[in-house]
Image: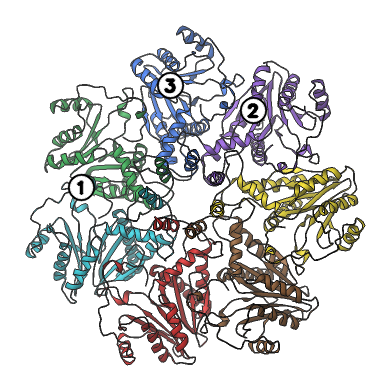
Chain colours: A green, B blue, C purple, D yellow, E brown, F red, G cyan
């Protein structure tokens, strides 16, 4: 019965304040983020690194179709965690904003401006009735005025800038790891390694080249580029992170998940 | 009483997050998919195969009117599972999108682009109030740039690419079978056989030519084509899958179902 | 009290999924169909037959005003069961669609196309908020390209093609009878007889010429035609179905029904 | 407490199906009809008769202002029972429809067409949200192509044609009386008498000329005409229906009623 | 607790039918009318009289600002009882209607037509969602074609014509008095006296010239005219109705009332 | 638990009638008025006086920013009590109305007309759904045709004219005082004194020049003018109302109030 | 269970009055403000000072991205406390208003006018349905006509002017401190010191230059300017407020907060 009345409570309603000043729907949307696999972002001296855990739930699923890393514009990448379909909406929104900026002002959109345009869009879904919040967090990374920038958007619509961060499952553990290992001034290549080390923290069996995705945008070329699987394999091998046993499929029903 | 209050809870409400970050309406819509009979999609070396269990609930019902396989465009087919009327809406949407693409750009729409246009449409029904989610999953298969592609859409609006998959009832068992039997590089003809083998896994009495539907789109002609009943009969016979007892009607009330 | 809280539950709400993936409002609408008297449709070799139980609830009521058989276009007839006022809405919708088709394309609308236009209209009322589903099922019969076609629409918006079917009360029993008695290749005249036999299955006192309605559309003239009462009387007499006792009125309150 | 929670249940909600396929709001609207005093309609050989119980609730109230009989067009009359203010809306609607028909087609609107235009209007209020059903039933009578026609509209929006009928309170008893006394082929004058006899069935103290209203539309002049009070008095006297004691006022609060 | 759940029930909801066919919101609005002080209307041979109990709740309140009598047009007056702010809305509506009529047709609006325009407006607020009914009753009196006419509008939107009536508190007692004392053919002057007698029935301490309002519209000049306080004083004195003790203020909180 | 379910009841809902004909939301809005500090209005022979208790909740708060007295137009002032933000909306509305009147008719708006325009605006928020009532009462005072006028608006939208009145906290006590002390024909200067005497009734420690506000509009110049603090100080001293201890700040949380 | 039903109550509903005249949603929004870290505003003789506690929740978070101090226009600054995403909406609104004012009138917008434009915007979200109130308070400070002005906006939409104030957590304690320490006529430099002293009241470990933000707008240049970190460090050291231990990160989950 408790389960019933509990569910009943959440099958209706809109986003309003609780007596202690919290927005439950936003907090529940944050739970949807935690249900997704982890993504990591690291700001290096000469670039930005985005990395994501994208293990497929079945060996028959195409790893490339698991959308965790997205190119938003030439100079901007986005890593997501949480409700996949919601992430797609925000990425599309970001792409349109970046395009409009290029058309209107003839130049690339700033990373901070783009991030805040996204968070303002997210905020609307937490205040105006008739829709639910977005169940996804994003790491927005890119080059602005020759400087690497790294931002986070959360379901409340708050923007934060980070040196390094993780979103999605095990956020707390991965952040502890990043706080202890991250050093200012590291190179993009070192940051790729640190990102993989971080993702490996909660993957006891190690990582596979197909099960992770890594993208970089460097100050040099200001181009979003995904690291090829063969390169990932050698990096993982070098760092002793390569999974020995590749059976990463799962059993049955749990393959029906909305979050990555 | 419990049944009452249970029903009461679901007779109202909109799609919002539960405390653990789930969207109940989307999960219930996924149950509607499981209530439908199975559909299977297999990507072969030289084409794509779609197959569906379409047993009629009465010998007086025209098997051809059981809509599980749909031609979305010359080069794209769709297999569905779940709420039939909802499937029709999505297929119509897909057809219009494909047509518009041809008119606007003078070329066939890519399979991935078409799939993501559908899933973005589905997502809207899970976030904006005033409507329920679509209670149907689709397998979208076709040829893009000379390559076979095979995608899935689910009620949350998430797109995934597969080598082989099943949707609808007994999804878990059929996927296990596909994972163990599917091999990369099989031909379209072999894939037709594998698709029928898969559907037969949960049909102990075997299959009938009228009770299944199979469609192929090959790299050669890029044309959606349904396999004729006579061909199906000989294939079923060859694979020893032909039902010996044809009485596949059912008794009474259960014929009133919304799902296939 | 139980009755109270039960009613309370259904006096509000919209059409959403239950945890097992069902749409209660659609299922309840299907109950409204079952509350209506039976209608039967049979596809013959050379035509289509629609028949309906249309017993008046009072001898003072004009049998002709009990709307169970409707002419949708010259070549299309519709038999209904369930909520009468809802049926009228769908018939009007069908007539407008058929008319528009003639005006726009200069030719009669196909039976299958017309049916699916109706079911897509019905589906909207099960997904978009602010209205309830239609509480009526239809049998749509007619001639398309010289071939008799026979379809069903239900409250979920699913279209099915049948050789022979019944809708409304006692559906299960009447379908059993049709499954055992229907034979492919029967003539329209034989189908008229079979339709009356079917309706008589659950009318122990027999039928009256005013208490039933029968319409045919044959391949020859492609014209919807209702069988005159005098012809019905002789047919009923020939088949020994004629009611001996004509007192078919009812007592009091139960005459206030919304369904036929 | 029970009364409270009972009321609570009906102070909110919209018109949707109950599990047994009924529309409670429509059924409750039908109760509003029963709360109104009776109206009777009789189709004679050469005309139509409408009659209504319109006893005033106070001797100071003008009987003429109790709206139970309405002229919808020259050739159409309407008798109502139930919620007075709702009846006025439907009568206004009918009048506008009849007027538009004359303007557009230059001829009087058919009685059946007019009735069905009204019932389709009523049906909308039972399916689309944001309003309640109409709490009134109408008897629509008139001359069409030289023939008397007599129809009923109920809160569900169902049209029926009758030889003779009653609506409002004591419907069941009055219909029994009509079924036993009505004979086809009676003249309009005889029908006036029968209508008054019927109304008198549940008025033990007899009728007064001011307490009833009678209108006729005959085939001869196709004009709605109300029978003058003096004629009514002599008819009532002839039939021994005249009330001996005229004190038909009521006591206090019950004068505040919405239904007639 | 009962009080709580009781209130809870009425703090939400819309105007729909209860199982016994009543509209609770309309009935509760009628209670708001009863909470207002009494108004009386009397139709005389040569005019119409409107009178109202308008005792101020404080000696500091301007009696003239207690709006119970309103001039709707030169030839039409309105007396109200119930929710004051609602009354103002309806009076404004009436004035605009009367003005438009003069502009459009160049003549004064009929009393009956004006009344029914008001009641049709009131009815809309009882059927269409998104607003509550009007909590006020009106007595509409005036001269039409040289004849005095007197109507009532209630919260359901029902119009009635009266010879004499009262609305507001003690309606039942005042009507009993009017029924026993009113005689057809009385003059306007006599009607003024009768109106004051009626209001005095439930004012044991008598009436004050400031505590009542009386307006007349006579056939002679067809002009709404309020009887001056000095005239009222002498009339009250003549009829021995004059209050001896003028302390008609009240104590504290109860001065905060929405109804008059 | 009671507190919980109590709150629950008022966190939703719209303004509808209770069974005894009351509008709870309007009555609760009236409670918001009582939560505000008192304002007083007095009509003198030669002008109008508005006064308000505007003690700051902290010595650091600027007394001038506590909005209790407002200039609506040159010749009109408004004193408010209750929800401050709501008061601002109504004052803005009043100012726009007064401005429009000057532009359109080239003359100052009448005080009565302005008041009724405001109350009609207020009434809309008590009848139409989608918004809550205004939680504020206003005293509107000014000069019209050379005469001082003084009106009140309350949350129900009822306008009343007064010789002298108070709104806000302790209304009942302050009105008793005014009823016993007010005399017709007093001068504006005497009225200023009476207004301060009245406010002092419930301020045991006396008043401070900053803690009260007084405005006058006299027949002579028809100009809204606030009495300077130095003048107030001497008047308070003269009447022996001056507070000896100025520590009028409060402790902590209670400074977060919406009402004044 | 209590927790459940408690949450249930706040997951739905709109902003309406409680029986004691309070707006719960506004009061809960005020709780959201208290969940944010403190901000302080002080009006000096020659300028305005805004200061904010902006400790990062992780050493990897960029302190500059914690938005507590905002430049609204050259001459106006805003400090916020509460829901960050809501604050951004209001700041954007303020900036657009200030810009429009410059474009339309060619001059800087007054601080009081700007503040009241913001509070009127806030009020709308507390009265009109379909959205929740803003969960943020603002301190708006700037120079108007050569004078420093300092205002507060709260979730109810009430504007207040202050000499010195704090918003956010520990408001009561910080205000006590300000009330005892603030002196009129202090210089901007002294006010910077007092602001830091105030923030340090509830930070036992002292403050860090990155963990606080201070901005000034002086009468001299009327330019919003943030105090550089190096200046802050020396000021903090001078006042003995500098934190000795810099480990101001937090542990895990609590980093997911919407408020600052």
Q: Position of residue A114 (x, y in %)?
A: 29, 47
Element assignment for label 1: loop
Choose top left, top right, bottom left or bottom right for residue A96. Answer: top left
State which quadrant residue B120 falls in: top left
Question: For the residue carrying disc 2, how many other residues have a C-alpha within 10 Å: few (<14), some (14-19), or many (20+)?
Answer: many
Q: Does residue C88 appear anywhere in the picture?
A: yes
Q: Is residue D95 above or below residue B74?
A: below
Please report contact status of discs 2 and 3: CB closer than 8 Å, yes or no.
no
Q: Is residue G211 left or right of residue E25?
A: left
Mark whose residue sits in front, 1 or 3: 3
E121 left or right of G56? right
Compared with D1, A224 (above or below) is: above
SS class, disc 3: strand
The picture places residue C142, in percent across and down from the top left corner, at 68, 27
- How many marks on residues? 3
Residue matched to label 1: A145
Name the spot of residue E255 as percent of width and height, x first: 51, 76
Q: Which numbered dot is residue C171? A: 2
Secondary structure at numbered mark 2: helix
Residue that carries the numbered disc 3 in the rendered image: B40
Foreground: disc 1 or disc 2: 2
Between F167 and A234, the one lying in front of the other is: F167
Residue E131 quadrant: bottom right
**Badge 3: few (under 14), some or many (20 or more) residues near its Cα, within 10 Å?**
many
Disc 3: host chain: B
Q: Are marks 1 and 3 in contact (CB under 8 Å)?
A: no
Report, in whole angstroms, how far the alpha carbon at label 1 lies from the one at label 3: 51 Å
Chain under disc 1 = A
Q: Residues within 10 Å of mark 1 (few under 14, many from 20)?
A: few
């Amino acid at each position: 019965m408790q389960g019933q009345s509990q569910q009943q409570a959440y099958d209706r309603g809109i986003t309003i304040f609780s007596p202690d000043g919290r927005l439950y729907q936003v907090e529940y949307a944050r739970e949807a983020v935690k249900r997704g696999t982890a993504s990591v972002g690291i700001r290096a001296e000469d670039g930005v690194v985005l990395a994501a855990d994208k293990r497929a739930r079945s060996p028959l699923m195409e790893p490339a179709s698991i959308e965790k890393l997205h190119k938003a514009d030439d100079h901007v990448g986005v890593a997501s965690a949480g409700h996949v379909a919601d992430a797609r909406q925000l990425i599309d929104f970001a792409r349109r904003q970046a395009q409009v900026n290029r058309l209107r002002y003839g130049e690339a959109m700033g990373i901070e401006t783009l991030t805040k345009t996204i968070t303002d869009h997210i905020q609307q879904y937490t205040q105006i009735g008739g829709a639910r919040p977005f169940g996804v967090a994003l790491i927005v990374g890119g080059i602005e005025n020759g400087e690497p920038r790294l931002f986070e958007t959360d379901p409340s619509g708050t923007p934060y800038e980070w040196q390094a961060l993780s979103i999605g499952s095990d956020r707390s553990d991965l952040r502890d790891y990043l706080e202890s290992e991250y050093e200012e001034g590291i190179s993009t290549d070192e940051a790729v390694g640190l990102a993989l080390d971080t993702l490996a923290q909660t993957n006891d069996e190690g990582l596979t080249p197909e099960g992770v995705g890594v993208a970089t945008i460097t100050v040099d070329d200001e181009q979003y580029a995904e690291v090829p699987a063969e390169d990932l394999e050698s990096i993982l091998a070098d760092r002793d992170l390569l999974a020995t046993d590749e059976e990463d499929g799962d059993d049955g029903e749990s393959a029906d998940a909305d979050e990555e």
